[in-house]
Amino acid sequence: NRQSDENGWEWGRLYNELGICLVLTRNHIAMDSYPGVNTDIVVKTWAKPNPKTVISRYFVFENADGERLGQALSQCVLIDVASRSVVRAENYGLYIPEYDENDVPFNDCKADKIFAARYDTEKPFLTGSRRVAYGNLDYNGHMNTAQYIHFAEDFLGREFFAARKVSSLDIKYNYELRYDDTVYMSASSLKVPPVDENAMQPLSLCDNIYISGSTKNSDGSGKIEPTVHFEISIKSKSI
């Protein structure tokens, strides 16, 4: 966007001149309310000054009257394209200027930490698989970051969204997905004292859901080891 271009973060310059690129690692989205059809929405965005290894960008969504609808945070790292290693912005003369804190709505939005151990991942209430299609790819040949959320939406399905409204979503991108990868997804609820050893928690009762997307690869010995490519935490409320 214009802010990035003005401060030397334009994609073409990073990739073609400096041999580096931004890689998205985390997204946090929290909604207070949802706009209706044909509602005008104002998006305000700014980046955290003086980044080291993690570059954070904040977003606020408002209606035409200035009422907040929601907020978001995205976090990226800079990597050297050739070595695939994380590099520091300052080593390439890249910076984000300071701003007057009175000019931004907030600067303390934080992504929720995703703790898989909090969820009953040994007994997921929903499992499934899906292949990465050509239309899911970005210009790098990896799955587009927005598609991970679409995969989760399709995975949970109509039943979930008919009964619940999502209040927040956190996603952690661990490894890239590529064309024709088979993604094995599972959804788990928070650990609770068991009532029925064989009972699965109904989807409509899950206030907090953990979704993981994995591929299955051989470790060279013939043993299949799953690689967790992405993790998603979703909080929702009954409609």
Image (spheres, rainbow, N blue to C red):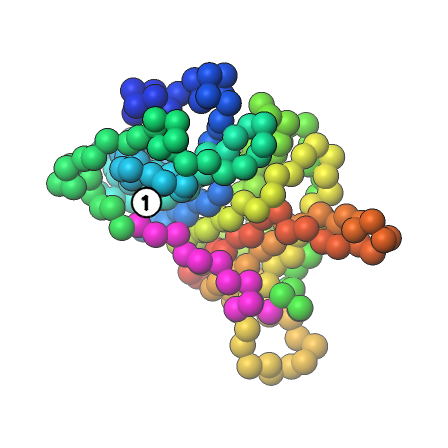
Q: Residue at x 58, y 55 (%)?
A: 211
Q: Does 183 sit above or below residue 93?
A: below
Bounds of the magenta segment: 109-120
Lateral position of residue 183 relative to residue 44, left or right: right
Given residues 79 and 210, the one toward you in this image is 79
Tell me the kind of residue under disc 1: Gln
Q: Residue furthest front?
A: 91
- Residue 17 placement (x, y as % from top left): 46, 16
Residue on which the image places disc 1: 71
Lateral position of residue 31 relative to residue 218, left or right: left
Given residues 98 and 204, the one toward you in this image is 98
Q: Does 64 sit above or below residue 18?
A: below
Given residues 189 and 119, the one toward you in this image is 119
Given residues 216 and 42, the one toward you in this image is 216
Q: Residue furthest right?
A: 222
Q: Which image quarter is the C terminus in?
A: bottom left
**Please, what secondary structure does the residue beneath circle 1 have?**
strand
Lateral position of residue 72 relative to residue 127, left or right: left
Q: Does 94 sit above or below residue 234?
A: above
Q: How many marks?
A: 1
- Residue 94 placement (x, y as % from top left): 34, 28
Lateral position of residue 152 relative to residue 237, left or right: right
Q: Which image quarter is the N terminus in?
A: top left
Q: Say whether residue 101 is visible.
A: yes
